[in-house]
Image (cartoon, rainbow, N blue to C red):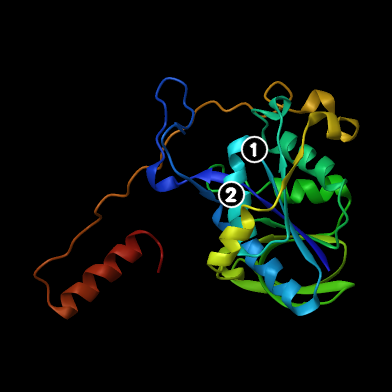
Amino acid sequence: MKIVVCIKQVPDTVEVKIDPKTGTLIRDGVPSIINHDDKTGIEAALTIREQLGGTVTVVSMGPPQADVALREALAMGCDEAILVSGREFGGSDTYATSGILAAALKQLDYDLIITGRQAIDGDTAQVGPQIAEKLHLPQVSYVEEVVEAAEDHVTVKRQFEDGYHIVKVKTPCLLTAIAELAEPRYMSVGGVFDAYQKEIKIFDFPLLKDDLELDMIGLKGSPTNVYKSFTKELKGAGTVLKDLTAEQAVEAIVKKLEEKFII
């Protein structure tokens, strides 16, 4: 089975800061990592390859330094890596990004595409489904388990509110992975060495332009306008009940729940 995993290099959110004047992320000096859900997708792809054979190709759109994330994926066991990069792509929103990645994927043979559910620096969960729509592929989002994988279909468990769906879908198709799907493996020493011996292919604007909506790429072609960015507010300490007996504590908690119409 030929599997393609789309990944994104993102800033480590533990150290994210916002420029108060521009409202944009300050990336200088901030370490970058593979997006968590994407890394889960890599592990799922490698597991399927071990079962069925085939190849795992990892694709990332970003600046030249994103090759670090691609080499980490190679060190985990992926077979080849492709960097989609060009000045024309800079500043792309989710719609523009999905169009560029879809154009890149048209250059490849695949049976299965896996993306992360969402990126931790954007949290939109839009790029994966948009890629599927632009490639006219069936898709299953929020995949938490691959129940069965075969050459012509996959059966997956899809997370759904307080339950789940079991979905069987024919290949080629696209899945979006959540954290519960798999525990990513560590890079091996041999894998790290091999990763830096492999070539990372570059898919640039001249290669992809014939499959792009040229007025819908980059910052100017992105329909999304971000009004303001801000960090998440810390939660308060809440109400602390002290020096109460067990019966008094239960009574106080029940009263609070009743006040909020929870019970």
Quadrant of the snapshot with the N terminus: bottom right
Horizontal placement of 170 versus 24: left or right? right
Identify which residue is drawn at 85% across, 44% down: 134
Q: Position of residue 71 (x, y in %)?
A: 61, 52
Q: Which mark is residue 221?
A: none
Amino acid type shown at disc 1: Gly
| Res. 74 in view | yes
Horizontal placement of 242 versus 173: left or right? left
Badge 2 is on which residue?
Answer: 69
Q: Position of residue 101 (x, y in %)?
A: 77, 42
The answer to whether residue 130 is above or below residue 76 is above
Q: CA distance from mark 2 to mark 1?
A: 10 Å
Q: Position of residue 223 (x, y in %)?
A: 71, 27
Amino acid type shown at disc 2: Ala
Horizontal placement of 73 versus 12: left or right? right
Counting residues from the N terminus, which is met first, the one under dot 2 or under dot 1? 1
9 or 200: which is nearer to us?
200
User: Looking at the rendering, which quadrant does residue 212 occupy?
Assistant: top right
| Mark 2 touches mark 1? (CB < 8 Å) | yes
Q: Position of residue 261 (x, y in %)?
A: 40, 62
Badge 1 is on which residue?
Answer: 62
Identify which residue is drawn at 86% across, 51% down: 108
The answer to whether residue 191 is above or below residue 92 is below
Q: Secondary structure under badge 2?
A: helix
User: Looking at the rendering, which quadrant does residue 238 occupy?
Assistant: bottom left
192 or 232: which is nearer to us?
192
The answer to whether residue 78 is above or below residue 212 is below
